[in-house]
Image: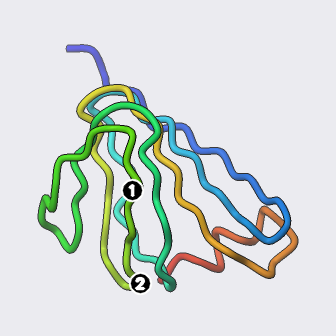
Amino acid sequence: MTPIKQPQERDYLNDGIYTKEFILPQGSKTLQHVHKHSHTSILATGEVLLHINHDVIRRVKAPAVLYLGADDVHLIEALENSTWYCVWHTDIKDVTKVCESLIKK
């Protein structure tokens, strides 16, 4: 059995807009997590299952724009090779510190 590749993550910060990009190989999942703030997500390519609060909420095919609420426990499961973006406004200027400020622990 071939092991499933792990998602790749990239961070972008420009003029107060922080974007996290997930490159999701087929069969991979993001880590389950919770954000302090609501945000927009964009499925640019592929097809995924969106899990919210431990349930599969919906199957999503690109292109799609979605809204994820604050305090929703969520993860993304790639049904095919996919690219997913999360987008937030931030006043933090250091890209290495933005993500840490958004995740609820």
Answer few, some or many: residues within 10 Å of disc 1's Cα (few below 14, many 20 plus, some between 14 and 19). Answer: few
Occupied quadrant, residue 56: bottom left
Q: Is residue 86 shown left or right of residue 27?
A: right
Q: Residue furthest top?
A: 1
In this orientation, which residue lies closer to the viewer: 38 or 96?
38
Residue position for label 2: 70
Q: Nearer the viewer, mark 2 or mark 1?
A: 2
**What secondary structure is marked by label 2?**
loop
Q: Residue at x 68, y 75 (%)?
A: 89
Mark 2 or mark 1: whose residue is earlier in sequence: 1
* Residue 31 pos. (x, y %): 39, 56
Answer few, some or many: residues within 10 Å of disc 2's Cα (few below 14, many 20 plus, some between 14 and 19). Answer: some
Query: In this rendering, is residue 9 above or below 75?
Result: above
Query: In this rendering, is residue 17 above or below 58?
Result: below
Q: Residue at x 58, y 46 (%)?
A: 21
* Residue 29 pos. (x, y %): 33, 45
The quarter in which the N terminus is drawn is top left
Amino acid type, residue under disc 2 in the picture: Ala
In this orientation, which residue lies closer to the viewer: 39 or 29?
39
In this orientation, which residue lies closer to the viewer: 37 or 97?
37
Q: Is residue 98 shown left or right of residue 67?
A: right
In this orientation, which residue lies closer to the viewer: 88 or 105?
88
Q: Residue at x 34, y 63 (%)?
A: 32
* Residue 74 pos. (x, y %): 31, 66
Q: Residue at x 33, y 36 (%)?
A: 28
Amino acid type, residue under disc 1 in the picture: Leu
Residue position for label 1: 31
* Residue 20 pos. (x, y %): 60, 54
**What secondary structure is marked by label 1?**
loop
Q: CA distance from mark 2 to mark 1?
A: 16 Å
The tag on residue 49 is none
